[in-house]
Amino acid sequence: MSLKSNFDSPRLIADIGGTYARFAVEQAPGHFSQIASLRCADFADFHAAISAYLSDLAPIGANGPNNSNSSNGQSATSGSQSQHGILHAAIAIAYPVEGDQVRMTNYHWQFSIEEMRQRLGLETLVVVNDFTALAMALPKLGPADVRQIGGGEARMPSVIGLLGSGSGLGVSGLIPAAEGWIALGTEGGHTNFAPRDEREIAILRHAWRQFEHVSFERLLSGPGIELIYRALAEHGGVAAEDLQAPEITQRALDHQDPLCAETLDVFCALLGTAASNLAVTLGAMGGVYIGGGIVPRLGEYFDKSLFRARFEDKGRFHDYVAAIPTFVITAEHATFKGASAILQAQLKTLEATPGSAILGQIRRACAELSPAELRVAEHVLAHPRDVLGAPIVEIARAAEVSQPTVIRFCRSLGCEGLSDFKLRLASGLTGTVPVTHTQVNLDDSMVELGAKVLGNTASAILQVRSQLNREMIDRAIDLLLGAGHIEFYAVGHYGVVAQDAQFKFLRFGMSSAAYTDTRLQALAVNVLKPRDVVVIISNGGRLQELLEVADKAHERGAYVVAITASQSPLARKADAALIVDHVEDVATHLPMISRILHLLVIDILAVGVAMRRNPEGVEMLSRLAQDALDEKDSARPAGQSPRAQRTAPGVTLASPLAKLTSHSR
């Protein structure tokens, strides 16, 4: 069957459990082909398993997948991208994924996500908890993909619960959000098992001999079925055979063995208790869904089991849980659908708001670049990960420019050179620092409004931090230290930044002035002397009056330090340009975040100047300031808190460097 691809390239989707690793290729949303299930025990590690799958993968044509599973005779290495055109992959795995290192809970496989991405030659590798992926599939399931057990009716939108047994017990949930759903990555399967009757107390006692901590997962899993079987045999005084979970389950379904049937009955009842606990914990009025590798295979046996009765057995909360519906997930590829949805959301996020601040900076700068520099920019935007590992000669060849042009391009973005550019690019592509902007809405509460404003400001500060250029900061500080006189120029709402800078530098005993009126600026710049320094503060860097100040300052032999946007005319005129790229919402008619960012750059310059003038003095004054605070604490009246005295009106630390501290080197 030929299927036209809706994606730019096919995607690899995987569901990795403790027993089996399932793989598929997705070329269009929800269309999975070349599905294979491999036993984990047959492979030394995850890379070996995925390589085996890729080596047997049939060639993928431009119009659709070839559903043949015959081997193409090629081994899967880092060239898998070129063999099959797979650029992006999503892995759902039985592990609480939090960082780069993955160590499976119920199997010995472990790997680094970034290292695995590189070895497989992928542009994007998303690794998520398997039940988080299954949870994200729930909104995409239709009536034919689930089977309701018992009564109840879902209230939507509302919280949804999810749990399922396989090699372990997975637990997750979905919380409705304004633009979709938020999946909960939990390890709820490790909550303490609580017995309901004498039989279950006997099971717990048996389990205690093997485990110090007996969680629900110890019983509601494949190994758990085996443990329940042995415990019931001991409790009933009968001999237990050496049976595995699949054999116990099949004998129960075939009504061949009363002990196996009792084992499965207890399993279903305990699962009802675990599901009920999840329902009341989450307030899952949207229903509780059962997935995993065991229950969907039980069919009608599960429907007639004690599951629903135990689910509703909640004492005073019987009516509460009785109104909550329970469903068994019958869809064949539900986890694949969820992993695919998470991958698609990640790719959309990278496309709309790139993970790298410097990629966004490049996009904004394109209009100001020379034709040759623009070719470099286009190459970087198209192949950011390739650029990370490529030497300058390969980047220049790919962009069809000279090597000096590549260096000029990097420096035009405020980077010291190619190495500095690659460091910033790598930091953004790994997504270690989330830089996001949340829109403030008219119906936001005051708490929501405050959180959004603070969050947006914090994100902008992190972005500026990623753009800091050590060479330019050192250059600006050198110019300020060598200046006979310093003048700060700004207009409009940025005038307060210039006035704050003047105040700081006057406290250092350095000759300083601030001018915020364009007529005074035109007069003041005409009396500058050689080696004086003009610091021009401008968000856009295009105001003609400030550009004329820069030109006139150079004519007078003075130096120009600019705090402005990259690729702006002012940045090109400056002897040292400190880049602050922040697009302010002009609809507000009032700069907010950008003004804070400019103030922070002034603080960086002030701290740098202070430390270079007298490094020992900074340390000494900090100690003196602390000593002064300690003396005040010891002398404060009984019952008065230290904070109350330190923030009393009129009480300040008069030493000019007392507040100059830093949390990082």
Image: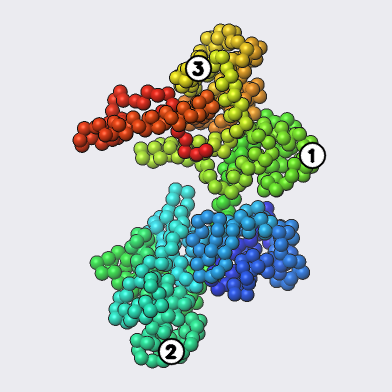
Gap in angstroms between the C-alphas marked 1 and 3: 49 Å
Gap in angstroms between the C-alphas marked 3 and 2: 89 Å
> Dot 3, how many residues are within 10 Å of its Cα: few (below 14), some (14-19), or many (20+)?
some
Camera-side mark, 3 or 2: 3
| Front in this rendered view, residue 602 or 349 | 602
Mark 1–mark 3 contact, CB under 8 Å?
A: no
Any part of residue 328 in sight? no
Question: The residue under label 2 is which amino acid type?
Answer: Ala
> Dot 2, how many residues are within 10 Å of its Cα: few (below 14), some (14-19), or many (20+)?
some
Q: Residue 390 at x, y = what percent?
A: 73, 46
Residue at image mark 3: 510
Q: Secondary structure at mark 1?
A: loop
Residue at image mark 1: 400
Q: Is residue 595 above or below residue 186?
A: above
Q: Residue 210 at x, y = what percent?
A: 41, 77
Q: Residue 481 at x, y = what percent?
A: 56, 21
How was the colour assigned to the protein in this rendering? rainbow
Q: Secondary structure at mark 2?
A: loop
Residue at image mark 2: 240
| Front in this rendered view, residue 256 or 243 | 243
Residue, x 53% and y 66% (percent of image)? 104
Q: Residue 91 at x, y = what percent?
A: 58, 61
Q: Quadrant of residue 256?
A: bottom left
Residue, x 46% and y 67% (percent of image)? 170
Any part of residue 662 in sight? yes
Label 3 vs 2, first from the N-terminus = 2
Label 1 vs 3, first from the N-terminus = 1
